[in-house]
Image (cartoon, coloured by chain):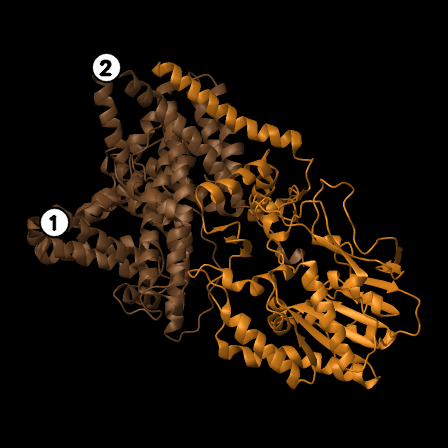
């Protein structure tokens, strides 16, 4: 029996050692992207003398092999399930299951409260310049700060985990004050949501974005705010919309990192206009037939937050051909996507830019070219201090 | 190339096994040639630019050995010359930066070149010196075949992290050895266990250690202790795991390597710890430095000097930094104290207290070893003694206990000879006629080894899990 066990063991081991390279050779060309990780898989590295000499070839081959190992996704999914359900780790793949919501694991390293005011003043300065520029031709500029899901639900974190409380309180507060000091009209949606009792329904439990109800509340606040500034804009009332819960499973960013293994029944919601405002759409300069809500072909197929406007584009233009209404420019992160499905109905022409992707001209040049009556910047609060992207709003002429 | 990589496990390893075992056993030179070629490829994987240092060491050692044949004139000079030609690259690659840094700290303003340290240079240099010393002493004959000496120096299982092998043990096996199924099976199982030690335990506990050592002002008493204990365990599982893999592979190829660890955390004194930890290095320093200096058969003053010299070198061998010097001197002080001051009192203490004494001292020693600077070591040790900037306890400390709860629970028994206890009990029951015990003894370790290989592979793959959150915004 001893001999048999030894031979059987060695055979099994050798089979395992050979199966992986054989499987990789057979199937490695099939996958080019890791869906759950939302990234491209490593490409086979070029074999060059320099790569051999410096050793980068070995490191690159290791990345490629790890990415293309047969059954990688299945194994990682099983590992995630074991980490979550069997080992019950507080954080799995960087996600924390905090009761009924999924939150990101946050580093314990955080800025001190007193570090924020000078950083906020620095961040607000270009917005102040942009504001002066827009006001110089009679336009209105408003910045809308929206709490990210982890900030909105930060009280759900277990006590022993970092919730970046200082960033959420001192950081957000300093930013709002600095924007006011720079003369920028700043609409703090965290305060607005607080005033409404911080309804849970406003935010997704699985995604870093708000839910469509949160977006609708933000839309109402923005239009009320613009009305206070003197803009009489048509508003989509609740009665004008049919809030529909989609039948499709909702693969949100946080649950996506958990291979969609976290049990939930959350569904995406759309606000379909009962009497739709017609529009002509252009994406990145091309005429587009994309609707406001890009739905999967069948009910069993999953949806993501990208269903709103079809995801992020460098530039989108929605024309409603109602010249009696003002024109708008919205720039910001993906929190704009759900808002765009509502806001366009209040304007003649709505231009949308995502400055992380748009590089045809500077924002100042773009605004100078189109001179929109209303300019809205929509950002979630975790971006306030990051710089770049949609904070890159001004360069001196 | 790391053992705990996909390229090694599922590329290099099956390739070398197939090429090696497809060659008939009677063609020994062919099998040795396969091992040498794969060993050189293994080394060059990290960058062919590192290979000249190894090639130089092989050539100098081989030529030096031939010139050290007993009866030749000028052997002493040849020995010192060959040893120096081996040690000079080590000194250059490893200590130039340290030396220039210290000179610049004195205000000299010397330009410090960027020097890439060839992997494993400390190990293969020590093997080369031991070979030269043994040939010089006449305890081993010089090796005439360059390929055999090169294989001794570059044998891939022990090339990067040891154990440090003596040519007297290794050389004869190159000419005659037998690879057997029982040896291959036992070696392969040991390899899998070593891989699991490294990937499942050491790497996970390393996260807790890294966080504690990077905590700065957030450091609490609890976090400092968690971090230092995590590092104590990480280092053991990392190094002994690597050694298990090396020894396992050596056994597969019929080339048994010397044991390097004997459950060091069972030690009841600093002296005993060093008889159980990195044993091949301790033996090297004993045989090639300590005893030639006079060992302990000399005056007390001379003995103290010998201890100091050996431990200063031991510290510096581990790394070119003042923390390693301090760590070496720390053990010199402990061993001197145990020899001349409190050794008698220690012997009279209950074994459990002696164990606690040793573990505490080892743990403090590893803080010195791990710290990036003497200042950081001071901060961590102060925190462990109650003077932490962040107070007594923090959520971060609790997180690292919870997140790695399973690793903590498994690591403690895994650092003890629990496996041996279980097997001796099973063996007794097997001898008493228990079929269940017999089946468990025969199949248990092999099944467990396969499971651990699978789990380690999944962990290796999951360490490549990375999602780009900003891509989604």
Q: Residue furthest front?
A: A239
Structural distance between the alpha carbons of marks 2 and 1: 51 Å
- Of residues B11 and A74, the one nearer the viewer is A74
Judged left or right of residue B394, residue B364 is left
- Tell me where residue B80 appears, x and y as whole percent: 29, 47
Tell me the orange chain: A
Judged left or right of residue B397, residue A104 is right
Q: Quadrant of the C terminus of chain B?
A: bottom right
- Of residues B190 and A301, the one nearer the viewer is A301
Above or below, A349 against A125 in this view is above
Q: Find disc 1 in the rendering and name its residue.
A: B296
Q: Quadrant of residue B313?
A: bottom left
Task: Specify few, some or many for label 2: CA neighbours under 10 Å numbering under 14, 14-19, or 20 or more.
Answer: few
> The disc numbered 1 marks a residue on which chain?
B
Kindly identify the residue that appears in the image at 56 percent across and 81 percent down.
Answer: A118
Q: Is residue A333 visible?
A: no
- Tell me where residue A378 appears, x and y as whole percent: 71, 69
Residue A246 numbered tag? none
Kindly identify the residue that appears in the image at 55 percent across and 54 percent down.
Answer: A102
Kindly identify the residue that appears in the image at 48 percent across and 40 percent down.
Answer: A82
* Dot placed on the residue nearer the N-terminal end, 2 or 1: 1
Picture colour for chain B:
brown
- Of residues B7 and B193, the one nearer the viewer is B193
| Whether label 2 touches label 1, CB < 8 Å | no
Kindly identify the residue that appears in the image at 78 percent across and 72 percent down.
Answer: A362
Q: Find disc 2 in the rendering and name its residue.
A: B433
> The disc numbered 2 marks a residue on which chain?
B
- Tell me where residue B421 appears, x and y as whole percent: 23, 32
Q: Quadrant of residue B28?
A: top left
Q: Nearer the viewer, mark 2 or mark 1?
A: 2
């Amino acid at each position: 029996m001893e001999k048999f066990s030894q031979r059987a063991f060695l055979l099994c081991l050798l089979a395992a050692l050979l199966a992986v390279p054989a499987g990789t050779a057979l199937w490695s060309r099939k996958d080019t992207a890791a869906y759950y990780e939302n990234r491209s898989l490593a490409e086979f590295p070029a074999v060059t003398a320099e790569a051999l000499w410096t050793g980068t070839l070995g490191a690159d081959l290791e990345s490629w092999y790890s990415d293309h190992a047969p059954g990688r996704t299945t194994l990682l999914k099983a590992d995630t399930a074991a980490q979550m359900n069997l080992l019950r780790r507080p954080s799995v793949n960087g996600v924390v299951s905090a009761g009924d919501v999924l939150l990101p694991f946050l580093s314990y390293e955080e800025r001190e409260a007193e570090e924020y005011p000078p950083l906020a003043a620095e961040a607000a300065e270009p917005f102040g310049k942009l504001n002066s520029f827009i006001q110089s031709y009679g336009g209105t500029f408003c910045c809308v700060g929206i709490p990210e899901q982890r900030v909105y639900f930060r009280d759900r974190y277990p006590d022993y985990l970092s919730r970046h409380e200082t960033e959420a309180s001192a950081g957000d507060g300093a930013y709002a004050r600095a924007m006011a000091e720079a003369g920028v009209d700043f609409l703090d949606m965290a305060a607005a949501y607080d005033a409404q009792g911080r309804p849970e329904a406003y935010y997704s439990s699985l995604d870093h974005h708000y839910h469509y109800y949160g977006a609708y509340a933000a839309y109402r606040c923005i239009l009320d705010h613009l009305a206070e500034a003197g803009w009489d804009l048509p508003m989509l009332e609740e009665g004008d919309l049919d809030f529909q819960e989609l039948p499709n499973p909702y693969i949100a960013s946080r649950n996506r990192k958990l291979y969609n293994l976290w049990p939930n029944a959350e569904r995406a919601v759309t606000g379909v206009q009962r009497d739709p405002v017609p529009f002509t759409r252009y994406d990145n300069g091309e005429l587009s037939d994309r609707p406001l809500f890009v739905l999967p072909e069948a009910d069993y197929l999953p949806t993501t937050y990208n269903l709103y406007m079809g995801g992020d584009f460098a530039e989108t233009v929605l024309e409603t051909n109602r010249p009696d209404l003002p024109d708008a420019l919205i720039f910001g992160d993906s929190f704009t996507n759900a808002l765009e499905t509502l806001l366009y109905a209040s304007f003649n022409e709505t231009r949308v830019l995502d400055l992380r992707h748009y590089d045809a001209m500077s924002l100042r040049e773009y605004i100078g070219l189109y001179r929109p009556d209303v300019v809205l910047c929509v950002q979630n609060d975790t971006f306030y201090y990051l710089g770049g992207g949609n904070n890159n709003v001004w360069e001196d002429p | 190339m790391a053992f705990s990589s996909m390229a090694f496990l599922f590329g290099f390893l099956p390739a070398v096994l197939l090429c090696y075992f497809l060659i008939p056993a009677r063609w020994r030179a062919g099998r040795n040639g396969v091992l040498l070629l794969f060993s050189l490829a293994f080394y060059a994987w990290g960058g062919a630019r590192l290979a000249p240092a190894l090639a130089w060491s092989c050539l100098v050692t081989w030529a030096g050995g031939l010139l050290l044949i007993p009866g030749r004139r000028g052997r002493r000079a040849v020995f010192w010359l060959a040893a120096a030609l081996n040690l000079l690259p080590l000194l250059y690659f490893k200590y130039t930066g340290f030396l220039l840094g210290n000179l610049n700290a004195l205000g000299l303003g010397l330009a410090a070149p960027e020097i890439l340290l060839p992997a494993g240079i400390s190990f293969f240099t020590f093997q080369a010196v031991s070979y030269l010393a043994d040939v010089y002493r006449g305890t081993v004959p010089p090796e005439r075949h360059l390929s055999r000496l090169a294989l001794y120096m570059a044998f891939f299982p022990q090339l990067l992290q040891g154990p440090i092998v003596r040519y007297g043990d290794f050389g004869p096996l190159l000419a005659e050895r037998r690879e057997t199924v029982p040896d291959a099976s036992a070696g392969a199982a040991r390899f899998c266990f070593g891989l699991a030690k490294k990937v499942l335990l050491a790497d996970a506990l390393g996260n807790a250690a890294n966080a504690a050592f990077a905590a700065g002002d957030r450091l609490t008493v609890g976090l400092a202790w968690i971090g230092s204990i995590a590092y104590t365990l990480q280092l053991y599982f990392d190094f002994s795991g690597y050694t298990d893999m090396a020894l396992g592979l050596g056994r597969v190829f019929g080339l048994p390597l010397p044991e390097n660890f004997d459950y060091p955390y069972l030690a009841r004194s600093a002296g005993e710890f060093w008889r159980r930890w990195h044993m091949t290095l301790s033996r090297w320093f004993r045989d090639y430095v300590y005893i030639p200096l006079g060992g302990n058969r000399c005056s007390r003053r001379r003995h103290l000097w010998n201890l100091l010299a050996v431990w200063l070198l031991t510290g510096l061998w581990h790394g070119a930094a003042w923390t390693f010097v301090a760590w070496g001197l720390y053990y010199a002080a402990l061993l001197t104290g145990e020899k001349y001051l409190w050794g008698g009192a220690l012997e009279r203490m209950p074994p459990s207290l002696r164990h606690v004494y040793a573990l505490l001292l080892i743990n403090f020693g590893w803080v010195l070893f791990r710290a990036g600077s003497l200042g950081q070591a001071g901060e961590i040790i102060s925190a462990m003694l109650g003077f932490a900037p962040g107070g007594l306890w923090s959520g971060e400390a609790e997180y690292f206990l919870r997140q790695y709860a399973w690793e903590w629970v498994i690591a403690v028994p895994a650092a003890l000879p629990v496996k041996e206890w279980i097997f001796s009990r099973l063996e007794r029951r097997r001898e008493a006629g228990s079929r269940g015990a017999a089946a468990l003894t025969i199949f248990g370790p092999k099944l467990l080894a396969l499971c651990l290989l699978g789990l380690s592979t999944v962990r290796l793959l999951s360490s490549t899990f990375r999602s780009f959150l900003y891509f989604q915004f």
